Image (cartoon, helix red, strand yellow):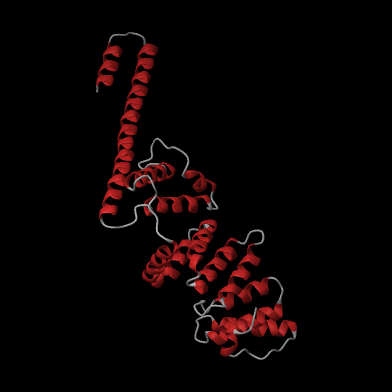
Amino acid sequence: MIITAIGVSAINNTDSYYTMRDIANLSRDLMEISYLAILTSVLSYSREAESQADAWGLLYTREAGYITGDSYEVWQSQLDEDQHSDFEARRNSGGIFDMFATHPMNELRIIALREQDRAMNGGTASTRSAQDAKAARRAYRDHIRPFLSSWLEDDLKLRDYGSTLYVVDRLLIDNDDAGVLNYYKGEAYRRRAKGDDLNQALAAYRTAVGYPDAPKQTYRQIGEIHRRNGDTPQAIEAFELYVAGAPDAEDAWLIQDQIDTLKTSSGNEQPAATTGEADTRGL
């Protein structure tokens, strides 16, 4: 308001059109700078409030009996995931200061939380033993297992396959749910389809079918890659294993038609695989 009043007063006391125009433009620019200063001040307060919330959260975490060192590990994992992204903007997001950001940079959060954790624990970081850490991971996995496939499927829809691959590899640390996880590892490589990705996808699918929790569609994906590569006998074999293992699947008839077409085109009539063969035939 003060800038506006000064500008109006200056305009009223000049008789030159160009001078009035310049004063009006200057007043407008000063107002925009003022608004920008106010906005950055508000956002700076938001970043400080977030940092204070982190500090208080760590105190409450300790009072509740949890390991405070896990706090910065969470942010480190997020930073590492960003670094594995297929998108350059995301890879750079954690280390670039943004004056309009409402949250502190991840790297600064990690440093602050690590320092506070050590200060709260006599100068040393609070950690779990390897055995306790594994037990905690497995307890957590038991809770999220029913949602694992749907979450990974949703993650793939973001088309940031490098990030998905990083997440899957972290989840494979104890080799739990290896059938499901290797299937989605294969899916990430297959959907990205750059460089050697299809071979990597095939390797992941082959690993997946060695575990009882592998999704039934794994053999279908193996067959599709072999078909694309022109490996007709191996494609037929994998497709037959899929149909034998999932005869009621909505696309079973389509895959059977694909099998018949491949056999006709190659002149290679093969007996259909039985369900019992699904886990014993190495593709």
Q: Where is residue 20, by image quadrant?
A: top left
Figure quadrant of residue 47 = top left
Q: Is residue 95 left or right of residue 10?
A: right
Q: Position of residue 48 (x, y in %)?
A: 31, 38
Q: In which quadrant will I find the C terminus? A: bottom right
User: Horizontal and vertical percent for residue 41?
Assistant: 31, 32
**Is 242 situated above or below 148?**
below
User: Which residue is at 38% across, 54% downward?
Assistant: 70
Picture quadrant of residue 266: bottom right
> Seen from this angle, which residue lies furthest front?
122
Residue sitting nearer the eye, 142 or 135: 135
Tell me residue 252's x, y (percent): 54, 83
Q: Nearer the viewer, residue 251 or 50?
A: 50
Q: Is residue 280 left or right of residue 166?
A: right
At 52% from the left and 74% from the top, the residue drawn is 179
In the rendered view, would you say 101 is above or below 147?
A: above
Q: Position of residue 76 (x, y in %)?
A: 44, 50
**Residue positioned most to the right:** 267
Tell me the quadrant of the picture where the N terminus can be found.
top left
Q: Is residue 99 above or below residue 227?
A: above
